[in-house]
Image (cartoon, rainbow, N blue to C red):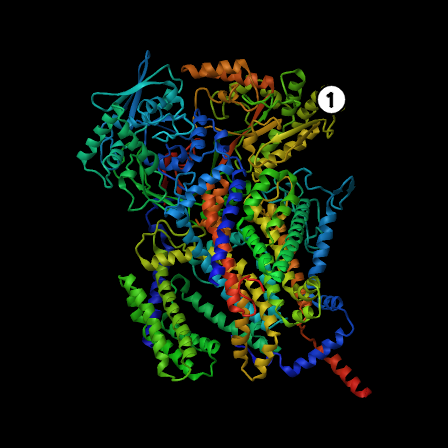
Amino acid sequence: MKLNRLATAAIAVAATAGLAVGLLSPANAAPKTTVSIVQSNALTGINPGVSSQNLTFNVDVAYLSGMGFTYYNNKASLVDNTAFGTYKVVSQKPYKVQYTVNKGRVWSDGTPINGIDLLLSHVTASDAYSAIAGLGDPADADVTPSFDSGGYGGLYEQFVVGLPILSADKMSVTIEYSAKVPDWRLLSPGPNAVHAMVLMALEGKTKLGTAAENMAAKERFYKVFQSYDTAALKKIGALWSKAYNINKIDSSTNPLLLVGNGPFMIKSAVPNGAVTMVRNPKYNSGPKVKALNTVVFKVIGDGTAASQALKNGEIDVYAGQPTADAVAQLKAMAPAVKIIGGDQAVYEHLDIRVGPAYGTQAPYNGPFAGMSQKAKDLRTAFLLSYPRAEIIEKIIKPINPTSQLMNSLMSFNAEPNYKELIAKSGVSKYTEGTQASRTAAALALVKKHYPDAAAGSGSVKIKLLFGQPSNTRRVSQSQLAKAEWAKAGFDVDVTPTSGWSSYLEDPKYDVAFFAWVKSAILQSGNVGTYETQANYQGYSNATIDKLYKELGASPLTAAQITAKYLQVDQELIKDAVTLPVFQHPSANGVTAKLMGVAPSPLSPNLIWNLWDWYFKN
Amino acid sequence: MAFRKDKAPVDSELSGEQAIFNKETEGLSQGQIVFRRFVRHKAAMTSVFVLASLITMVFTALETKIGPWTIPGWWKHGFEELLDLRTEGCPPGIVGCPTIDAVPSFIDGTGMGLGMHPFGQDDIGHDYFAMVMRGAQRSLYVAFVIGTLAGTIGITVGAISGYFRGWIDSVLMRFTDFIITIPSIIIGSVVGYHFGNLGVGFLAFYLGLFAWTGLSRLVRGEFLKLRELEFVDAARVAGASNRRIIFKHILPNAVGVIIVSITLLMSGAILLETALSFLGFGVVAPDVSLGSLISQFQDSFTTRPWLFWWPGLLIITIALCINFIGDGLRDAFDPRQRRRLTKKDKENAKVQARNAAANV
Amino acid sequence: MFAYISRRLGVLFVILFGSSFILYNLAAISGDILESLRLSREPNAQQQIIALTRDLNLDVPPPLRYFLWLRGILGVFIGSPDFGLTRTQQPVINEILLALPATVRLVTAATIIAIVLGITIGIVTALRQYSRFDYAMTFVSFLLFSLPIFWVAVLLKEYLAIQFNNFLGDPTIPLPWLIGLSVASGIFWAAVISGTRARVFQIFGGVFALNFAFLSFLSATKWFANPSIGPIGIALLSVGVAYGVTQLSTGITNKAALKSSLAMAAIAVALYYPVQWLFAQDAKAIIYPLMVITLFVVAGVVPLKFTKIDRGPIIRTSMISAFLMGLLLVINELMQTWQPYMETDAVYFRPIPTVGQVNALLEPGNFWMSLLDALVHMFLPTLALLLISFAGYVRFSRGTLLEVLNQDYMRTARAKGLTERTVIMRHAFRNTMIPLTTIMVVDFVSIIGGAIITERIFGWIGMGTLFNQAINTYDLNLLMGVFLLTGFLAVAANLVADLLYTALDPRIRAGSGGK
């Protein structure tokens, strides 16, 4: 027994010493190649093209496992992925664009990528193809089309003519459009591993095919596509719509489902839990992966939990829309953690109701109704006394210190034409002087129509719509604003409303503030938002409607676009119907050793350049 | 763990104690005995004192509107009042830090005092003391409404079904099962969505309508047990009405269990409201409750801890007091319960015994 | 009795039908399902609204839509129930089957420990009514009962995970902590054992010194970096277990019981190395069950050597001892896995996690590693649930035991000259368990549906998470799926509680069959 004890003690001492050495010299270790990123929602499927699957995280995972002709960078500009292929306009009349895949690009199973892989995106975006091939009308409210795609009814459908034409060498596809498409660069067809789908849907395979099988399957898809083979397309459609909606992925998952051409491929996914992606060894369809071998997405719904997990080293990147306190917490973790802030392509604005929303019956008779001088004065007064600067200062800057007041509804502050727009749009009346002087001016305007108006008189009763009770940021905003509005004679009801978005067209509310989410940068920009049929405010302006049409008709130069944006901004300011406030801030906590993180304002926000990330030693 | 024999009560000792208690309770009514026992329960009395002072402080702090009348509060700010954010004297990067100073002047030279904003301010300048006071009002209110409503329904349903049994019991208990299955969070979210503007009273009312199930099962269990005992049979034979048996014979015997449950229910109600607020279904802004404050500022834990600790401290204090009072009431109502004799009691008893002997 | 149960079950289905109908309609009107689409500026937002309406039958009013859902459920009678799909096209039944084990794992561990701990402390406080220990525990249990769980969670994560992991970087306990911990345990044990003032000080001093020495030893050897019990520790603890179990189960005076328990301890020590060898073998599916069976067979046979009369209690004693000793060996094996576990890339010397159920990066395949991984992930959430739920058991068991102690039969038992141990363990404890049993059943089930916040904060995917997700995304099929299960369990638990109550307490007449 004694011997045992001595032995144990000796072993314990040796082990401890070994461990101590190990702990004291971690610098010898190679830099990490595994990154853990927090996600607030779980993976629900790996084909975000399906209408029910168009969720942020699904899109992120799909982005990492598949590369196309373009992607957005952190400046919100579209980057051509020349490693994958090129595209150019080959004919102006009729307007034709040719998309060419570079030779030698391969899927993760080794199958070469060619033009045939670009054809499926026509099937899932063209309503006409779906109808002709007997796959169902996507606009039908009762019957789901064979391809349950969320891509129908968009820009592509609006402009595309006929079928895409495959070139003789099968590396290019030429697509004809009915007119010069303003945003033609956004319409590039994405590659799909059609051979895998054919193998699964038409041949019932559950294992990766041989090279010959894969090529044969690809040709088979081309035939099916060309001949509108309804039966085969329906089978592929069923597979495309259903088989990819999996949230559990492990070694038993059909490997054909996981074939991709992106830098990473899914290795495993725990239902509603972590998703592990590993580097695709055959990847050559985009920028080189610098260092990372493994990416783990951990699902943590609670913000505090995520920041504590970061502190505990369980995750390397905390991304989200944190509160001021969460940001302060991240700051307190310095130097182990750095904060990379930024702006999202989401902007908060204040909309005033002018009449009943387009297509609704209930009348609006509130103080802001119509285009009379009185209504305009009251609207102007309301906007003047809206304490935008104070909101930024108190609520937004603690989250992102570089946040600024937004003054154009057309362009974000960082965009090149922003300065020109705000110089000429007339927005300066909402920025000149101090808030006190603006509120005084507002009170004077109200007095014109309500002679007994004074600070706190509550002469004009207003009902504000702005968000869930649980959205504390909006609640704070509303309370700051209420206090200032009161000084201009407005009595504003700022009770938050659950399910508020369903009341956006409700004339019960005179004013609403909320945020628009931009998912792509279009030539028409935000103009569509204020077009008669699209806005919830019941606002109709012939000039804006005309400008919107022009912006959507054909490609314009930057100067022409700016001129039109300016006109829209001027109209909106003149009619005093809306004011922008701020771009939603983002703050990401990142382990200090992780380099290369540069969040983009557009989806897939944080991970757009995951290939550039690396750990320094 | 070893149970030491010498600590257990032994019969000879018991009879002595019993004598003292009998002496003490001579000629007193049940209510008086309960009251005496309760008053003697130190923890409970401390809790009564703390809770009463807290309630007084909380409900008089802010301006209250009752119908057309407005009663001014003793605190200078209202909970919805927007004030300038204080930055001087705060650590760098922190705004609205608390001004309360509990360190006397001979230590740090600044002197004790509440200052401008004793509990600090929130992000946009609300006085946090006023908010905490308001929050405590709402939370106490929620606890009271849920406790009363759920208590009344629970006792009534439990007593009726336990006493009458048969089909009445079946119907009532299946109805209880039915209520049990409906999750309170759904009620919270639906009420919040459709009647959020009606305020916290409405929410409390609805939660109260669904929170009585545990209590009713408990009361039923007690009644089922007690109605089989000899004294109930005796009362029935003597011709007592059902009403009398329920109220005079069974209820007093079950009251200990009931009171503990109700106090647990009340402190549970505060926590339920906190949980609902955490999930976004509780009290609706701009109104606040302790629960909504604590969940709103849960991120402040390391950066502005006062925003997190004050409402937390109040929740704990209130819940603790309610529970201790319940504990005291339980002990006081339990007819078999004996309190521990102090040395003084024993001395007194000896003296009395000696006097009695001497008088003979 | 059978008629009674089947009638109750029949009513159960009627109840579930009614409340599911109400719930379905309430949930359908509790928010705006189209919110994100209304705020989308995508050119085909309208098309997406059409697709969503199509998927979820939004054009059918909720009361009628309920019956569409019910039609799928009623498939249970033809053998193919259809619980529908979630909004993201996953079969609801799959989601639930994946979430349920997680919740059960979390809740079972927390509930069992809470019950054992709560009842133990409840009993001790009742026996020491109005002592300092009683007051202290009353205060602590009320305090814990009053804490919001997300608060507890934040604190636990900060101190028991983040700081503890930092500590493991250099596992020496700083002196103030050494003193603090020793003082705390000194005070605790002095209060529990109590007695005269001198004795209290003796106990305090003894416990303090022991603790201080023990912790210093652990600290000096950096035990926390590479923990193990070792054969010596196993020997000491096994003998302790043998004495303790015998004392509680039959009384230390029962020599046969003590001898057989001690024999079990001897066997445990003798098997220290063989068991370790067995644990390292591959065919776990065969070896482990065999080991468990052997354990109980040996524990059942050995006592026969020591006694010929009154074998029941003695076999029971030796089985409990053997089980606890087996547990010690398992704990020892887990401890030895600790260091390799810490050294994996996935863990990298920060073993206590704050979120998640498993470490996604850990290579599967190593049984002990995976078990340890699962256990460390359970640590904080279990502790949080435990802290706030055990207070209730303390209060209830204390109250019930106090009531029982005042009953006449207790006096009778004592008058018969039974030992205090017999009176407490056999007469008082068993009667205390009657009401507690029924509370436990209902409690257990209610936590299954109610661990929403715990699961959210600790990143667990269980029934609570599904429920919360269903409410927030207005996912009616998912909500109803979760509801059917939790609602069924809740009602069934009450039925079980009722039956248990009548079975345990003969004074209550069975069922509600009238007079």
Residue C110 drawn at (x, y percent): 48, 59
Q: Secondary structure at mark 1?
A: loop
Instruction: Name the residue: 49% across, 66% down.
Output: C116
Residue depicted at 73% across the width and 76% down the height: B22
Q: Amino acid at mark 1?
A: Tyr
In the figure, A548 relative to C512: above or below?
above
> Viewer-proximal residue, A325 or A538?
A538
Q: Name the one closer to the observer, A176 or A105.
A: A176
**Residue placed farthest to the top in the image?**
A93
Of all residues, the one furthest to the right in this rendering is B359
In the rendered view, would you say C192 is above or below A527? below
In the image, C470 versus B47, the foreground residue is C470
Read off the residue under disc 1. A450
Q: How many callouts does the rendering have?
A: 1
> Residue at image x 50%, y 47%?
C17
Residue C325 makes an appearance in the image = yes
Label 1 Cα crowd, 10 Å radius (few <14 / some 14-19 / many 20+): some
Residue B292 coordinates in the image, percent (x, y) = 60, 45
Residue situated in front as seen by the camera: C466 or C110: C466
Q: Residue A17: image x %, image y %?
A: 35, 62
Q: Residue B66 appears in which quarter of the rendering?
A: top right
Q: Circle 1 marks a residue in which chain?
A: A
Q: Is residue C435 left or right of residue C82?
A: right
- Residue B316 appears in the figure: no
Q: Position of residue C286 (x, y in %)?
A: 28, 63
Quarter holding the C terminus of chain C is: bottom right
Q: Is residue C45 left or right of residue B193?
A: left
Where is B273 relative to A444, above or below? below
